[in-house]
Image (cartoon, rainbow, N blue to C red):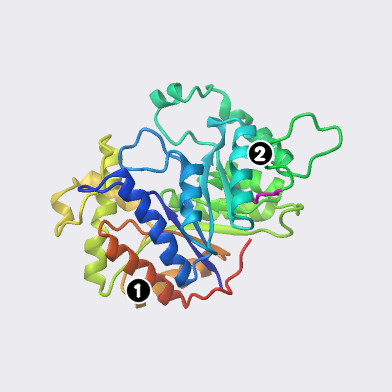
Amino acid sequence: MAALSILDLARVREGGDARGALEQARDVAAHAETCGYTRFWVAEHHNMPGIASAATSVVIGFVAGGTKTIRVGAGGIMLPNHSPLVIAEQFGTLAQLYPGRIDLGLGRAPGTDQLTLQALRRAPEAAEHFPQDVRELQYFFAPPQPDQRIQAVPAAGTDVPLWILGSSNFGAMLAGEFGLPYAFASHFAPDFLLPALAIYRERFKPSPQLSKPYAMVGVNIIAADTDAEAHCLATTQQMSVVSIFRGTRGLSRPPIDDIDSYWSPMEKEQARRWLARSIVGDVATIRAGIDALIAETSADELMIVSDVHDFAARLRSFELIAQAHGLDKQAPTA
């Protein structure tokens, strides 16, 4: 059975604040742990008032400290924004504090806008060095060599598992060549999902970390006790997507009864394409959608985004998703 995991954006909601968003992320992870989810990831985004996970390694430590068994990690760290040595030090420290529970997913996109790139001191050509940076991270996480003059203390020897994240063919090729698990962001780039998975599996070469391909598929899933309620809850995410097109990213909004009164016909079509693989509905609808997605992709794991404004409804969504999939703690892990 495919594993289920959670990607949390630590969304700051209207009427709330960043601290509340972070505390809710921790509490969702603790709840997911009891439901049998495999891992809980947060992502690096900058200059976005509605997302509180910019200091990603700090958030991971906070969430890991509030849980006991669930894996916690980055989905992901935008590696060209950082020195591999510093990321190794951060995640090596997390691995020392929470052994066997830390994941490091790596992306090459900036996770922000062009102006903020300058504030991050990211060089324009930084993404071109992504493959070399991944290799450098592997070097720092490996046991130190006798003649090694630079060590990432306390990362050396922790062998923190790396993942390659992607929304195009580049990440698929790299993950395959490096023999690493691959996570595709079909929750916002659905058109490239199947070609990327095919490339990854065709290019895969066994590595010390992984003997055969392991593919994770990102998917938006919103569950409620009825289809109608779930579709109402989903308007929060639909409005968030439209705000990206409008260039007005802000706080997460409560659901509305009539989404057609919010967007234009063009925005509706844009959102439909962005959210094309979303699964929204009651338990039966979610079960059918998950089964169909796994059958189509042969995914080893689904990484679920459930962008629900109300906290109690969000917890309920994850409960119903787990119920729909017959989730248990024996699901495979990479």
Residue 277 appears in view: no
Expressed as whole percent of the image width and height from the top left, the position of residue 266 reads 24, 44
The residue at the point 76 percent across, 52 percent down is 207
The residue at the point 51 percent across, 43 percent down is 57
How many dots with numbers?
A: 2
Q: Amino acid at mark 2?
A: Val
Q: Is residue 203 left or right of residue 217?
A: right
The residue at the point 19 percent across, 47 percent down is 263
Q: Amino acid at mark 1?
A: Thr
Q: Relative to 205, say whether 295 is above or below.
A: below
Expressed as whole percent of the image width and height from the top left, the position of residue 54 reads 43, 39
How packed mark 1 is, by other alpha carbons closer than 10 Å (few <14, some 14-19, many 20 or more), is some
In terms of depth relative to the viewer, which is nearer, 203 or 138?
A: 138
How packed mark 2 is, by other alpha carbons closer than 10 Å (few <14, some 14-19, many 20 or more), is many
Magenta segment's dominant SS is: loop
Q: Which residue is mark 1?
A: 285
In terms of depth relative to the viewer, which is nearer, 170 or 116?
A: 116
Q: Relative to 99, say whether 168 is above or below.
A: above
Measure the alpha-carbon separation of dots 2 and 1: 39 Å
Q: Which residue is mark 2?
A: 134
Residue 162 within the magenta-colored segment of the rendering? yes
Q: Is residue 4 left or right of residue 282?
A: right
Q: In what element is the residue under mark 2? A: helix
Expressed as whole percent of the image width and height from the top left, the position of residue 100 reads 64, 58
Q: Nearer the viewer, mark 2 or mark 1?
A: 2
Question: The C terminus lies in which quarter of the figure?
Answer: bottom right
Boundaries of the magenta span: 158-163
